[in-house]
Amino acid sequence: MKPTILLAEDDEDVRNALHALLLREGYEVVEASNGTDAVNLAREYRPDAVLMDLVLPGINGLDAARFLKHEPATADVPIIGLTAAVWLLREGESPGGAGFDAVFPKPFQLDAMFGELRRLVAPAVAPG
């Protein structure tokens, strides 16, 4: 069974590119284009991990991550933040303090991001 990744990104081009890369790596992908849908889909699908932009319409990624980490059903789901606005994390606040297990600035290093994803989630089965 392939691990499921919830991809929460409002930029359609970035979302489509990451979706294709995640599929190539052997993951199942569920998409959200705003924070409200991300929270609802995380509840519904209980993904193996979440890749989430910090700046999202509706509930922003920071608040969505905090919410998911405080809800018992999703508290153990790893969340990787993606952002061009790392300044949104309060001064001195670690990504973990905001509910993220890691944060990658955009443009992100794909090797580093996928390495962290593999560290947090059982390795994906290579597509056959």
Image (spheres, helix red, strand yellow):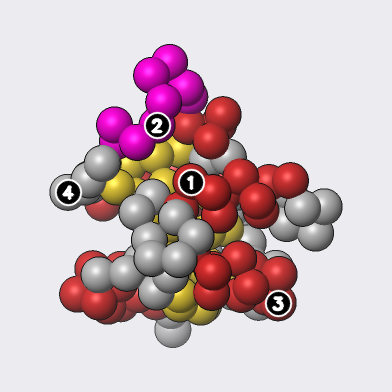
> Magenta residues?
86-94
Q: Which mark is residue 89?
A: 2
Amino acid at dot 3: Glu
Which residue does the numbered mark 3 point to in the structure image? 44
> Magenta span: helix, strand or loop, mainly?
loop
Quarter holding residue 41: bottom right
Image position of 18 with respect to 29: above or below = above
- Is disc 1 placed on a helix, strand or loop? helix
Q: Residue 17 lies in what quarter of the image?
A: bottom left
- Where residue 86 sits, quadrant-wise, is top left
Magenta stretch containing residue 127, yes or no?
no
Kind of residue at disc 4: Pro
Q: Which residue is mark 4?
A: 107
Q: CA distance from mark 3 to mark 4?
A: 30 Å
Q: Residue at x 38, y 65 (%)?
A: 57
Residue on which the image places disc 1: 62
> Percent from the top left, x then y, of residue 52?
43, 57
Q: Is residue 87 magenta?
A: yes
